Amino acid sequence: MCQVFCVLVLSLVVCFPDVPACDLKSPAVGILGTGDFSRSLAHRLLACGLRVIVGSRSPDRNADRFPAGVEVSTQRDAAAQAHVLFVALFPDHYSSLAALKGELAGKVLVDVSNGTTLNRSRPSNAEELAALFPESSVVKGFNVLSAWALLNGPRDGSRQVLICSDDFQAKNRVALLARSMGFVPVDMGCLSSARDIENAPLYLFPSWGSPFLCAVCLFFSFYIYNFFRGVLLPYMVNETLPLVSLVMLALVYLPGLLAAGLQLLRGTKYQHFPCGSTVGYVCASSWPPQLLLCSMHALYSLCLLCASSARYKLLNAAFKQVRLGQESSWMEQDVWRMELYLSFGIVALGVLSFASDVVSSGLGYAALSISTLHTLTFGWNRAFDPGQYEFYLPPTFVLAVLLPCIVLLGRLALALHPESRTWSNPLRHHAPLLHKA
Ligand SMILES: NC(=O)c1ccc[n+]([C@@H]2O[C@H](COP(=O)([O-])OP(=O)(O)OC[C@H]3O[C@@H](n4cnc5c(N)ncnc54)[C@H](OP(=O)(O)O)[C@@H]3O)[C@@H](O)[C@H]2O)c1
């Protein structure tokens, strides 16, 4: 999975250089198969001014399913006329094309198939197609586009088309075609990368697995802790959400901080950290779950005012006030605390949403500091109230704020350390996790 992630990350960087638009007088582009994908592709190719010939086992029956202007003929005829052919069949049916070997020799075959299950060991569909047609040049591509995206064009959905092939010229030709259709071809290298490309649509949120698992584990740990401390009430969810997010935010910076401490201890920044970069990547990619949890907390807090429990609490407070004969319940200190608490929370959410877009160490630390202040103002003097320690268990916010405080104090100590200041930007050269320190 990590390998797939790295390949996908690299693919975002290694795009094809600008190429001129496709020559409209070029020979027909062929499509084998008349299914959903074939129809959408034919539609798009035609809209780009290209001549399209579709090869079907039953051309007469399928011709009226294509827009006027698309030639629907036999598979043999399409294979003979076109130089670039999209194989829009399921891989199980590739062998049915064996009789066309002669016509397909020297042609470019574009394998658009997707995997149905994650393939980690078998050869890819594209490699199997290449083995069946050794005299053709097989290019893997276009599978990450759905028939819907093709039909609607590049303005709807992803514009990236991942492409790979062992034949450089054939790959460039298909890239040119993709660009002329308004998509962005991304060079994924040799045909051996086809498996990763076929697997790509099967990952719902690539690289989100570990951060989400971490979030779920933290959520249940805090929730169970809350459960033991008090009666199970709905607001516990709202208490738990921000604490998980805060601890995860602190976890992003902890590996970098430990690495930096280790560097200072070793007296050098030129030593390798085993599995350091992996931890750094995993932690850095935990922004989406954090942002999600914080946003849910903000929404939850807003909605809590509408909850019946809030109404009853307010009423009870009013009854008590009447019984005590109080005319004003305004508590200056409490008002200030709540103002600060809300302001820190809102600013922290804003900074966090920026930090998740622009992964920047400064912004991230700002989000961590403000979120910690938000939690501290929530705790205020409650942390020192013995009544809050039910069953001798500290309130959850006290536990949650520990790690962020350690990270922030550690960062401060590091910034003040004389050695770290004499090194030229000492924490930014090696592993990505050091960016975080
Ligand atoms: N649909 C999508 O959104 C999408 C997206 C990305 C990739 N893909 C890939 O595109 C390929 C085609 O998908 P599709 O959705 O277009 O499938 P489909 O609607 O089921 O069409 C498959 C076509 O294969 C042809 N075919 C040729 N030999 C065949 C045989 N022996 N038995 C059955 N059919 C045979 C048939 O056309 P004739 O009867 O005219 O020969 C049939 O229309 C698949 O590999 C899929 O993974 C699809």
Image (tube, rainbow, N blue to C red):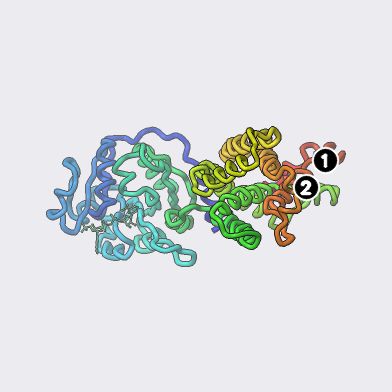
In front of the other: 114 or 178: 114
- The quadrant where ligand 1 appears is bottom left
Q: Are marks 1 and 2 in contact (CB under 8 Å)?
A: yes
Residue 270 location, x and y as percent? Answer: 78, 48
- Left or right: 134 with respect to 49? right
Residue 220 location, x and y as percent? Answer: 59, 60
Q: Which residue is mark 2?
A: 260
Query: Disc 1 on helix, strand or loop?
Result: helix
Q: Which residue is mark 1?
A: 420
What residue appears at the point 85 percent right and 51 percent down from the top-left corner?
265
Q: Quadrant of residue 92?
A: bottom left
Query: Disc 2 on helix, strand or loop?
Result: helix
- Closer to the chain start, of discs 1 and 2, is 2
Kind of residue at disc 2: Ala
253 relative to 24, above or below: below
Q: Is mark 1 within 8 Å of ligand 1?
A: no
Kind of residue at disc 1: Ser
